[in-house]
Image (cartoon, rainbow, N blue to C red):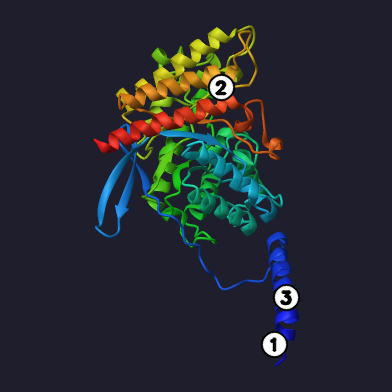
Amino acid sequence: MDTQWRDKKLYPALGIFTIFFLLYLSFNDNFNFTFPQIFLRQPYMGFAGVNETRFFIKNENPKTQSLTFQEFYINGWNSYWLMEESVWVSSRMRVSKMLKRGAEMGLSVCRTWAFSDGGGPNDLQLLPGVFNERVFKGLDFVIVEARKHNIRLILSLVNNLKAYGGTAQYMRWAREAGTNVSSSRDAFFTNPTVKAYYKSFVKAIVTRKNSISGVKYSEEPAIFAWELINEPRCESSSSAAALQAWIAEMAGFVKSLDQKHLVTIGLEGFYGVEKAGNVGLNPGKWAASLGVDFIENSAIENIDFTSVHAYPHSWIKGGVNSDARVDFLSHWVDSHINEAEKILKKPVLFTEVGFPSSIQKNGLYDRNIFLKIVYDKIYESAKKKKAGAGALVWQLLVEGMERYGDQFSFIAWKHPSTYKLMVEQSCRLLNISCLANAS
């Protein structure tokens, strides 16, 4: 054989062909050739748990078969768009960048959507129990990439709002199937067909085997918790009992499928009409009429930790100065930490805290003023080993993802003072965890 021809022409030609073939695979999302399945090896992570009012990470040493429990305080963020941007291979680099930059800031938990309900080409659930595998693989990628960067995910399972289908889509499907469904959106919490649809979806998510790692979601430590529903609200306070029953039923259902992960509701933290002593802490009288109650809902046995949101600029409108919003936020955070500590005896995680970037007369950013209030109260609670377990900023973007933004969204590294504030919070919470774990 002519070795000179082989070395000078054949091998270079094969090399060029291989490069173009791999590029074709990378950028052609419709390529259907199936290679023998080889699963990705992943870094070790321990599962998250709760010990009364504190989170911990359970680490196993395979050599000694010993267990260690590390206290875990959370500084994190929301990026609801991760699954949607992972559908196409060509856009996954933005998801990777977001998770990488979050890790570089010392952030440890990201909350994101694990739902998209409808009939669109990028929806996860096309019909009840019918899934778009391409989108499911996008969620697989998010989970694997999070674990790569030592980020834990809170995966929300349905939206109470209309965006991405939400509860309204479930009721629409039931009506299209001939089921008699009430016109009230509260029927989501009571109609047997609608509840069966939701359970079918939850089961498909929780029991899925990741196509990249080969790990079942129920066995995946990069999943921090399942969130039952984003911001549940009822049309009337008369539906409070129905919502309470739904939370208990669905939390129990998730636990029947998965005993390794934490479960939370997705509450905003409002107090109900029956809690007269706390109603005054709500951002307005309207909040008591939504059928939700922070204490009663969160006390359900299978709810491992409670969640609270904070949007003083959205909730308190019209002729109110910044001082009034500051005062509200301060009391809002204090009351939920105290009740989680003394009444619920569970950790409280502020899973959405959102503030605009407007500048006050003194030159300070609104976002920094309000975020520092939350951060300082979480830090003080953590120092005392109380129930304030952490906070997640709403929400972070990367360049090119501005279409997912709202008035509270921002690219952290383009706001140096906020970036610094977030990194400092990560450092001081990590320091508390390290001191606690060393003692």
Q: Which residue is mark 1?
A: 3
Which of disc 1 and disc 2 is earlier in sequence? Answer: 1
Counting other residues with Cα less than 10 Å from the Cα at mark 3, is it few (<14), some (14-19), or many (20 or more)?
A: few
Q: Is residue 351 visible?
A: no
Instruction: Residue 365: give x, y in percent of width and height.
Output: 60, 17
Type of the residue with mark 3: Pro
Cα–Cα span, label 2 and label 1 = 72 Å
Instruction: Residue 335: give x, y in percent of width and height.
Output: 40, 18
Instruction: Residue 2: give x, y in percent of width and height.
Output: 72, 90
Counting other residues with Cα less than 10 Å from the Cα at mark 2, is it few (<14), some (14-19), or many (20 or more)?
A: some
Q: Which mark is residue 311?
A: 2
Cα–Cα span, label 3 and label 1 = 13 Å
Label 3 with label 2: CB-CB less than 8 Å: no
Q: Is residue 268 above or below residue 369?
A: below
- Does dot 3 land on a helix, a strand or a loop? helix
Cα–Cα span, label 3 and label 2 = 60 Å
- Does dot 2 land on a helix, a strand or a loop? loop
Q: Residue at x 70, y 93 (%)?
A: 1
Q: Residue at x 50, y 62 (%)?
A: 40
Type of the residue with mark 2: Tyr
Q: Is residue 72 above or below residue 272?
A: below
Q: Is residue 98 above or below residue 45?
A: above
Q: Residue at x 60, y 45 (%)?
A: 97
Q: Is residue 330 visible?
A: yes
Q: Nearer the viewer, mark 3 or mark 2?
A: 3
Q: Nearer the viewer, mark 3 or mark 1?
A: 1
- Locate the C terminus and report the quarter of the image it occupies: top left
Label 3 with label 1: CB-CB less than 8 Å: no
Q: Nearer the viewer, mark 2 or mark 1?
A: 1
